[in-house]
Amino acid sequence: MKKGQKVVLREKRLEDAAKDYAWRSDYELARLDAAPTLKISFMDFLASYADELRLPSPRRRRFAIETLDGMHIGNCMYYDIDDGKGQAELGIMIGERDYWDQGYGTDAITTLLEHIFNTTSLERIYLKTLEWNIRAQRCFEKCGFVPYKRVKRCNSNFIVMEIYRNSWQKGVHLDEGKQAD
């Protein structure tokens, strides 16, 4: 478990499957993630979910995001881990709308970056966010990510943002809710 100011990141569990299925079946959440909504049955999803928990990929680390009092509100991960290039892609979703715009996403990202840069040799973390998703871009910038290019994928325009270990270590990220000097 990794504890932030507002959230705890923990390993995924089979009990998370129902919420994950609901979130991935939600049109608005899928749209924010530039992903198709799930069309498979919950039982098929659950079987695949259990397999993934049993045989995790070495190129991906997934975490549940919980509030400090234990409510599962979303997920985050880093994936496409490339040790040779020293980089990985970051993804996050706060599925519980009651927790939007309250700093939970920022804290989850900051906590995840702290975990990555303190426990791996990765030097660069990047992400893609939809060009029109200004709320997400502001969150990522607060966490120290900087935009560096635009890409088009599946008829959507994205901004690719990145952060490097050295800028993280210099205090670009948030520290106890305040920007470091």
Image (spheres, rainbow, N blue to C red):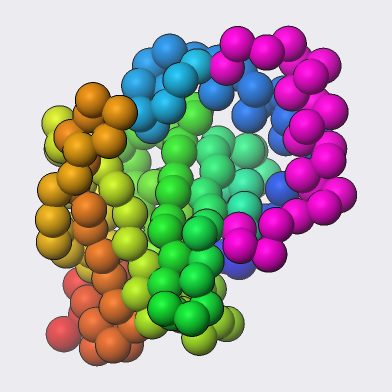
Number of numbered labels in the structure image: 0
Q: Is residue 33 visible?
A: yes
Question: Would you place residue 102 above or below residue 143 in this image?
Answer: above
Task: Report x, y in % for residue 150.
Answer: 14, 48
Quadrant placement of the N terminus? bottom right
Task: Report x, y in % for residue 118.
Answer: 51, 84
* Residue depicted at x 33% and y 62%: 126
Task: Report x, y in % for residue 69.
Answer: 64, 46
Q: Which residues are magenta?
A: 38-60
Q: In the picture provided, is 82 more to the left or to the right than 176?
A: right
Q: In the picture provided, is 160 more to the left or to the right than 73?
A: left
Magenta stretch contains residue 12: no
Quadrant placement of the C terminus? bottom left
* Residue depicted at x 23% and y 29%: 156
Q: Nearer the viewer, residue 22 or 98?
A: 22
Question: Would you place residue 175 above or below residue 75 in this image?
Answer: below
Q: In the picture provided, is 93 more to the left or to the right than 173?
A: right
* Residue depicted at x 50% and y 71%: 82
* Residue depicted at x 62% and y 52%: 63
Within the image, what quadrant is residue 101 found in? top left
Task: Report x, y in % for residue 72.
Answer: 63, 38
Q: Is residue 67 visible?
A: no
Magenta stretch contains residue 40: yes
